[in-house]
Image (tube, rainbow, N blue to C red):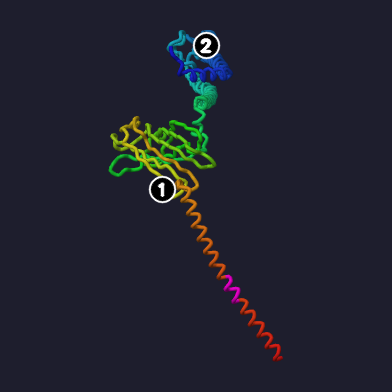
Amino acid sequence: MKIGKFDSTVAVLGTTLAQSVESIQVLLIYILLMSLVFGAILNQSERISAVEMAPEPFDTVPAASWWVFSRILWMRHSSPWSGGYPARISSSMVSICFLVLKSIIWALPFGQIRQIFDATWKETQELTEIRRSVELEDAAAMNTLWIENGKAAAIDIEVIEADDSDSLAGHAVVPAPILESESSTAIVQVALYGGTMNPWFGRPKLEVEVSWKPEKVEDGHSSGKLVIRPLRGTKFTSVDLSAQWRVLVKVPVHLFGSDAIRSWSSSHSTSGRSPQWDPDASGGHFDIRWTSNGGTSSPRHQTDASTEALLQKVLKVLDARSRKIDAIAKCTATIEQRTTSLEHALSDRK
């Protein structure tokens, strides 16, 4: 029998049983004590007289204890010597008492066992997730670690339902290795939020292939070729069962400027909850130019000419302001001379 895919469950059950030995022992002790005590009580209550024995199966204490034991373990129909019913009202009351206590003694140990099982299962799931993440990191190439490090550039992707209204079905942010100096190609899975897709369980997800071929990456500047290709989706929902979707990709090809954002729209996907796009499609190609001049590359002589023209304008402005300052200085000197002459005239009159 193949139990490879159930080995974790078997391990959890084994660990739970190993840690629940004390609870099981306490449960067995309770059952034995209840069987002996209530068996002795039933033997005495079913006696016809002090001399005459009680009828079967209550004629002896062991027989009556076995009768109680079989009912505590729900074995009255399958175990031998467990037939018959009490004939007296007092014995019936005793039977009701131990049946009520039976539920209590079964509930307490099994509550502890349930707690142990939940804790063990949670630990096993956490270890499984850690092991899986470690395996993925070990299997991942060194040039694709940008997917999880949180420092990669981000591009916007919108999934649009291909109908008359082109309604937004979901939105996602996909990491892109624009600032990586090495070429890399990876399949990235992202969850979609917003829009019209709201499945009952989980989130709709989209898988895209991101390919990056750098030309020059230095000091926060980058240039190269970026390719985004949608592959497949999961848990896509729509009122129309035959609905198809297309992907709108928005990439910042420049750091600033009116043409900093470039868009690309894919072809329609297949219909269904798990749509797929054409695997032979080339995807969206983007020429990334993250440079200080906004991405526009001008010849050197044009740059020098523009710089010289700017310097000429600055020099003209400075020369005009210098002339104004000289004129103001002359006016100020004239005013000072007149003020001095007036002061001398007033002093002579006195």
Density class for disc 1 (Cα within 10 Å; few <14, some 14-19, many ≥20) is: few
Magenta segment boundaries in residue numbering = 325-331
The disc, 2 or 1, on the residue closer to the chain's N-terminal end is 2
The circle on residue 259 is: 1
Q: Which residue is located at x 43 percent, y 37 percent? A: 225
Q: Position of residue 301 (x, y in %)?
A: 47, 50
Residue position for label 2: 49
Most common SS among magenta residues: helix
Q: Which residue is located at x 47 percent, y 32 percent? A: 183
Q: Name the amino acid, label 1.
A: Asp
Residue 176 visible to the viewer: yes
Circle 1: element type: loop
Q: Quadrant of residue 19?
A: top right
Between 75 and 6, the one nearer to me in the picture:
6
The circle on residue 313 is: none
Q: Position of residue 219 (x, y in %)?
A: 54, 42
Tell me, yes or no, whether the highlighted magenta stretch contains residue 328.
yes
Q: Name the amino acid, label 2.
A: Ser
Q: Position of residue 286 (x, y in %)?
A: 41, 40
